[in-house]
Structures are given as C-alpha cells and as structure tokens.
Image (cartoon, rainbow, N blue to C red):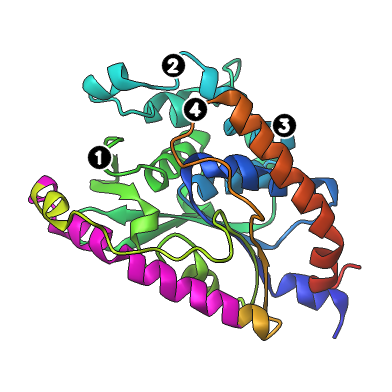
Amino acid sequence: MEQTNLLNRTALLFEGGGMRASYTSGMVVALLEAGIHAPFVAGISAGASNTANYLSHDGPRARESFTDFAADPNFGDWRTFLRGKGLFHAEYIYERAGQPGMPLQFDWDTFLNNPAQFRVGGFDIRSGETVWWGNDDTPTMPKLMRAVRASSTMPIVMPPVEIGGRTYVDGALGTDGGVPLSVAEANGYDRFLVVMTRERHYFKKPEKFPKFYRTYFRKYPAVADALLTRWWRYNQTKEKLLELQREGKAYLFIPEVMPVANGERDVRKLSATHEQGLAQARREIRAIKEFLGLA
C-alpha cells in the first residue's frame, strides 16, 4: 500500500474534556512540528478548539488557549455565572478573544485556506440530535467560532447557544459520548488517529444524582436523557476504539497521567500539564508517523 493512501484514509479525532485539553494541546503542537496534516479532522467540546487551532497551524495558540488564557480577567467566574454569561464566559472566550488585536487572535486566513475537511459537533437540546458543522457551514470566522462555542457549551455552567433557530449544548452529550468517531466513519474513513483526554483505564460511571438532572432539565428532557446515558455511550465508544487499536486501525494517544480536572484554572498547573502532554506527544511522533505510513 502506498504511504499516502494510509494518511488519506486516516481521520484525526480530538476528544473533549474542558481544561484537560491543556494536555492534548501538546499533541496539536507536536503534529504541527512534525508537518503531519490530516485530510479530515473532527473535534467535540474542547476538542473543537484543538481542531480549529490545528487547522490554522497555530501551535502557540493551541497552548495559550488552555494555559495562560485562563488568567484573562474576562475568562469567567461566579460573577459572570450569576449574570447569565457562564462560569466560563463563553461569548468572550470563543467569539471575541479570537478577533484581530484581541488576546487569543485566530489566524482565519490560514484556517480558511487549509484543504482539510473538518467537523465539530453540538447537541440540540430539544430534539436530542447530534449536529455536525463543517467547512460549508462556517464560511466566516464568526460562524466558525459560534460552532466551536456551541460544541463546547457545558450544560449548567454555560448558557446554551442558538444557531439557525436551534439551540445547542456540548457535543459530548451526543452520539459518541465525547469522541467524534461516528462522523469520521460516516465520511468514509476507516483509520483513526485519536487524541484522548483520559487515561487508558478510565471508563465512565452512571451519574449519582439522576433526579437533579431530571428536575433541572425538566423543560429539555433530551438533555437529561443524554446526561444520564452518556456514560454508556462513552464506554461503548472507548471499547470500540481499543478494539480498532488492537486491529491496527487506530492509533490512540492516551495521556499517561491527567493532572487536572475539566474546570482547572491554575495557570501553573495548566502550563505544567501542557508540557507533560507535549513531551509525551513528541515521544510518540515516530510511532504516529509509522501508523500514518510517513516514517
């Protein structure tokens, strides 16, 4: 088999995980350093940010997004939460901070000129449908960042996002439980480079307080249902990925450790976590190249 065929058949997938992406943003940096450019990239939640940064070829922004940016005074806290803006001030983080001259300026031109196909996923709070946005849906930077924001909107702590008359929260509630495997398969890919945010032994457990979610989301039962069954979908997807790995059809980048939780704000911890992820990614780049037929 020709080397290029392996790369062209491989989708790059970024799992969500909030500020755990401080670790996996190291993989973005390492892939760009190695000149590895996947033809199809998909991400959910924090993985949507990794997707955008990877496709704009911006390693420094990938790091900044999940490290130093947490110290930005507009990043969000209980005050923004009480004002209805979210514990993470999503409108600022995703739709304003990336504008020219702002703290997290996004390289839209490089992103737009990247020939790769991409998808980021959100969860429709009324229908329970997983919706995927891609190249054709995001012809402008505001539309892209709105989609990334919707994909990243953690229920309860961040306000839902409206796009095209529909309302969305975190794509991790959807089909695959947090890893965008099904959308890559639906687009014809049969090999996968998967960047995960939890250790190998991690599997989700059922939620401990189902009555709380049923009550809190009584107007949106699809959200409650998704939250209460996500553990099963996530575990099914992970089992499938581990099987694909055993078959030689997937390369799983799995954190050796995960020092931070999804809501971590301590910049020192986040920076140290990024460096750990980057070091692991650099160690694994040769193996990744071999999987992609590039070594």
Gap between marks 1 and 2, in whole Å?
19 Å
Gap between marks 2 and 4, in whole Å?
13 Å
Disc number lying in front (1 or 2):
1
Disc number lying in front (3 or 1):
1
- For the C terminus, which image quadrant? bottom right
The residue that appears at 65% across and 38% down in the rendered structure is 273
Task: Name the N-terminal-most of marks 3 and 1.
Answer: 3
Task: Name the N-terminal-most of marks 2 and 3.
Answer: 3
Q: Which residues are magenta?
A: 216-243
Residue 60, which numbered label?
3
- Label 3 sits on what residue type? Pro
Which residue was labeled with disc 2?
Answer: 74
Which residue was labeled with disc 4?
Answer: 265
- Label 2 sits on what residue type? Asn
Is residue 210 in the magenta section? no
Task: Name the N-terminal-most of marks 1 and 2.
Answer: 2
Element under disc 2: loop
Disc number lying in front (2 or 4):
4
Rendered view: 203 above or below 120: below
Residue 156, which numbered label?
1
Task: Name the N-terminal-most of marks 2 and 4.
Answer: 2
Measured from the top left, where is residue 263 in percent x and y? 43, 36
